[in-house]
Image (spheres, helix red, strand yellow):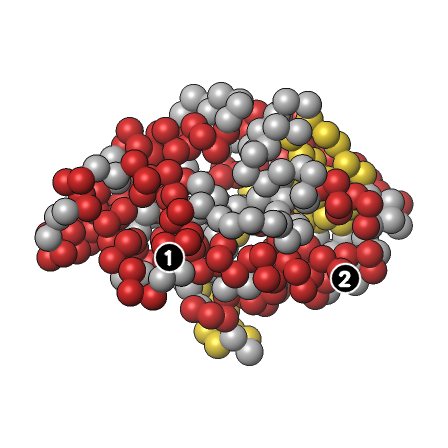
Amino acid sequence: MPLVSSLLLALGPAALGGLAGLTMRRARARESVAEEAFPPRGMLMRVKGDFGKTTVHAEIRGDGPDLILIHGASGSAREFTFGLMDRLKGRYRVIAFDRPGLGWSDDMGKTTRSPLGQVKVLQAAAARLRVHRPVILGQSYGGAVAMAWALAAPDEVAALVIVSGATHPWSGGLGGWYRLMKALPLRPLLPALVSAWATEDLTQRALSAIFAPDEMPEGYAEHIAASLSLRRATLAANAGQVNALRSNLRDMAPRYPRLPMPLEIVHGTADAIVPIGVHAEHLVRQVQGANLTRIEGAGHMPHHTHPDIVIAAIHRAFARARGR
């Protein structure tokens, strides 16, 4: 979540003082370069439902029971193709979706501002792939989407794995970027400024902050294609989703105790982005039989920094689902 906020706060006066026309032209040019450099590598599916028609991008690896991976804010399916999917594809059919408005999946405006709205689109894509009773893993904001999926279709979800998941409303506000993006007059301008003027050094520093206190793995920054996340439409869609999240979670959280499926939770005790005390520790108390694995001293990205622990939680979730 802090990637764009960090970039905006670090932008220099040259970027902020640039002419609007130059900024827009530069933003368009950089978006074209990003899209040419990082085209969709998976399947682009046209899906439809009561939300209308839209395109969803999915990366698929392996064969076996279905495992769905849902990424966090400002991300894409590339979050999981860095290494995790290849470690899982020998046992499962692993499906990583780009959430609506991010990566190569289309934005549906207000329809997909909420986790439940995104679930409707992803369910339609899962149906196209003939997904059957998946285990669903959600990381960060993706944790909210996974929880919404389970609430919407409890009989169709075999088990949940929530990794550093945003599952509960929090006190206080969000970062400066998200506050600014609530101001209607600024919304068209701010994404263009970031898209046009954010530097590679700023991106690297922002990504490092997401991993802190852990080290960012070598090659991660190049793999995830952060430039796709800095497109104007993607920045706007992500900000809309994150700004609406606390209200969505306020409605969702009281319903968690009725969830019937096995729930595995993995969370770092040093996660400053989605604090364990606000989210995971509340969730494990709410859901009967839920299991929380605390990783001492770990930050927000344990699926990269402690992958063996996350993979063990996935295996437990499948085993518990079979036991049901």
- In percent of width and height, residue 98 lies at 48, 52
Badge 1 amino acid: Met
Q: Which residue is mark 1?
A: 181
Q: In screen coordinates, is 176 left or right of 246? A: left
Point out the tag, 2 or 1, that comes first from the N-terminus: 1
Residue that appears at 29% across and 65% down: 185
- In percent of width and height, residue 45 lies at 47, 62
The answer to the question of whether label 2 and label 1 lie on touching residues, with beta carbons closer than 8 A, is no
User: Quick one: SS at disc 1?
Assistant: loop
Report whether residue 204 is seen.
yes
Name the mark nearer the viewer: 2 or 1.
1
Residue with the most extreme front position = 172
The residues tagged by marks 2 and 1 sit, at their Cα atoms, a distance apart of 30 Å
Badge 2 amino acid: Arg
Label drawn at residue 290? none
Q: Which residue is mark 2?
A: 255
Report whether residue 64 is seen.
no
Residue that appears at 46% across and 24% down: 216
- In percent of width and height, residue 131 lies at 65, 57
Q: Quadrant of residue 203?
A: top left
Q: Residues within 10 Å of mark 1 (few under 14, many from 20)?
A: many
